[in-house]
Image (tube, helix red, strand yellow):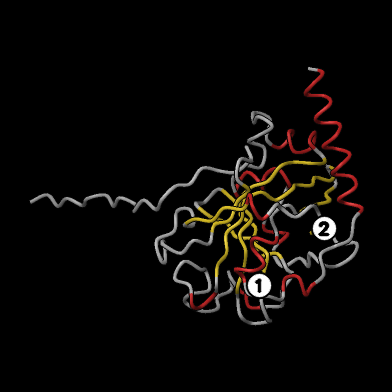
Amino acid sequence: MGRRFGRLTRTAAIGCEAMDGPLLPRDFFDRPVDEVAPSLLGQVLAHRTPEGEVAVRLTEVEAYAGPLDPASHAYRGRTPRNAVMFGPPGHAYVYFTYGMHFCVNLVCGPDGTSMAVLLRAGEIIAGEDTARARRARSSDRDLARGPARLCQALGIAREQNGLDVCGPGGPLTVHEGTPADPALIRTGPRTGVNGAKEVPWRFWIDGDPTVSPYRAHVPRRRKKVTVDD
């Protein structure tokens, strides 16, 4: 118990310092998506809600390159669902998937290019009690391990879609953390995508326990329809 308490105390101290630190500027996001994505590893995403503030150190992300990327939500053009992707960089694109989960992306690149980085996993560094109340059965490692868990732990849902993460005083912000050691950054295919599945645009910190496992795309099985004679 002593070791765990000591680790959580140090993590909380780091989290408080990170949330008091400077916000990432908009020009950080106004770059090609494959440059922004690895640069986000080690940075801090914080969300302030009435229940409390939770912050996560990002450990795993994926890049999506807009209309040129078959795996991107923007591949087939602008829709009401993905409209935020076609706006200015430094905004949150939140979408609902599988009828039960939310995922959060950060829009990047010049206005209108619809590039975005999916935030896949991280380590809770502040607000662990609040995160645990939202994910009561999770271990420390699993609190924000995976994009849906990350959103649940931070209380991110449809209402956060379109928020400016670079604006001072906003509820959802990205702060300067400690960038990941380049020697520890690994790349590989993106998880569960069908189009452009060979593109190595998943980035993670090697050896970090909060990184989610890789899963290849599995086609959905369609039920066979039988017709009685």
Percent position of residue 180, x then y: 71, 52
Say which residue appears at 57% left-offset and 53% top-offset: 186
Q: Which mark is residue 84?
A: 1
For this rendering, which residue is in front, 93 or 212? 212
- Tell me if residue 6 can be seen: yes
- Cβ atoms under marks 2 and 1 closer than 8 Å: no
For this rendering, which residue is in front, 75 or 1? 1
Residue furthest left as drawn: 229
Q: Secondary structure at mark 1?
A: helix
Amino acid type, residue under disc 2 in the picture = Glu
Q: Is residue 196 above or below residue 46?
A: below
- Mark found first going from the N terminus, 2 or 1: 1
Please state, as top left, top right, bottom left or bottom right, where the N terminus lies in the image.
top right
Q: CA distance from mark 2 to mark 1?
A: 23 Å
Q: Is residue 29 left or right of residue 48?
A: left
Percent position of residue 218, x then y: 36, 51
- Tell me if residue 102 can be seen: no
Q: Is residue 106 left or right of residue 170?
A: left
Say which residue appears at 67% left-offset and 45% top-offset: 152
Q: Is residue 221 above or below residue 114?
A: above
Q: Callout 1: 10 Å neighbours few (<14), some, many (20+)?
A: many
Q: Which residue is mark 2?
A: 176
Q: Is residue 105 above or below residue 85?
A: above
Percent position of residue 217, x then y: 39, 53
Q: Secondary structure at mark 2?
A: loop
Say which residue appears at 83% left-offset and 57% top-offset: 171
Percent position of residue 165, x then y: 78, 64
Foreground mark, 2 or 1, reads 2
Amino acid type, residue under disc 1 in the picture = Val
Q: Callout 2: 10 Å neighbours few (<14), some, many (20+)?
A: many
Residue furthest front as drawn: 183
Say which residue appears at 54% left-offset and 56% top-offset: 187
